[in-house]
Image: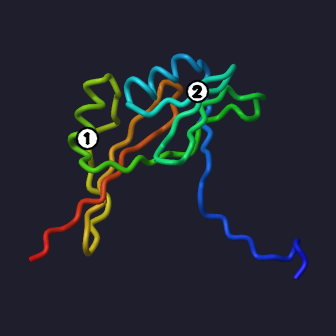
Amino acid sequence: MAASQKEVHLGEIGQISVNVHDVDEAVAFYRDRLGMQFLFQVPKMAFFNCEGVRLMLAVPEKQEFDHPSSIIYFKVGNIRDTHQALEARGVEFAGGPQLVAPMEDHDLWMASFKDIDGNTLALMCEVPKAIP
């Protein structure tokens, strides 16, 4: 099979880019309020480690690239505690944690918030159901 005809299977994400307008302010938000692991900063970009996936905050290069990002969902172990801790750091949520999907073996809870550039981010928590 020719190289151009091989099946391609994308899976692992190496990096996600989020548009920001002031890199220094964005770094302070993501590092200080959200507690994310800061890696490094270069002109117009900053990078964070999200459990092996790199998050790049970048000033859009052209007007056509200046738009809010896709929603990034951060997995947390305890959504109520995380929500409360982030609110104490000045993160403004759209509301409290909400049950969005009761499943057979767990319940999916979410809480959304915006960063300083209006990008929507969210917490997600899969809470195991008690075994009877």
Q: In front: mark 2 or mark 1?
A: 2
Q: Horizontal placement of 86 versus 52: left or right?
A: left
Residue projecting furthest to the bottom: 1
> What residue is disc 2 on?
40
Instruction: Check disc 2 and give the amino acid type.
Output: Phe
Write the residue at 38% across / 41% down. Answer: 112
Q: Is residue 8 above or below residue 34?
A: below
Write the residue at 60% across / 35% down. Answer: 56
* Relative image position of residue 3 (x, y in whole percent): 88, 73
- Where does the C terminus fall, quadrant-wise? bottom left
Q: Which mark sits nearer the N-terminus, 2 or 1?
A: 2
Instruction: Bin the neighbour count of mark 1 within 10 Å (Cα to Cα): few under 14, some 14-19, many 20 and up.
Output: some
Q: Quadrant of residue 2?
A: bottom right
* Relative image position of residue 96 (x, y in whole percent): 25, 41
Between the C-alphas of marks 2 and 1, the distance is 32 Å
Q: Horizontal placement of 40 versus 3: left or right?
A: left
Q: Horizontal placement of 54 versus 2: left or right?
A: left
Instruction: Check disc 1 and give the amino acid type.
Output: Gly
Q: Secondary structure at mark 1?
A: loop
> What residue is disc 1 on?
96
Mark count = 2
* Relative image position of residue 54 (x, y in whole percent): 57, 42
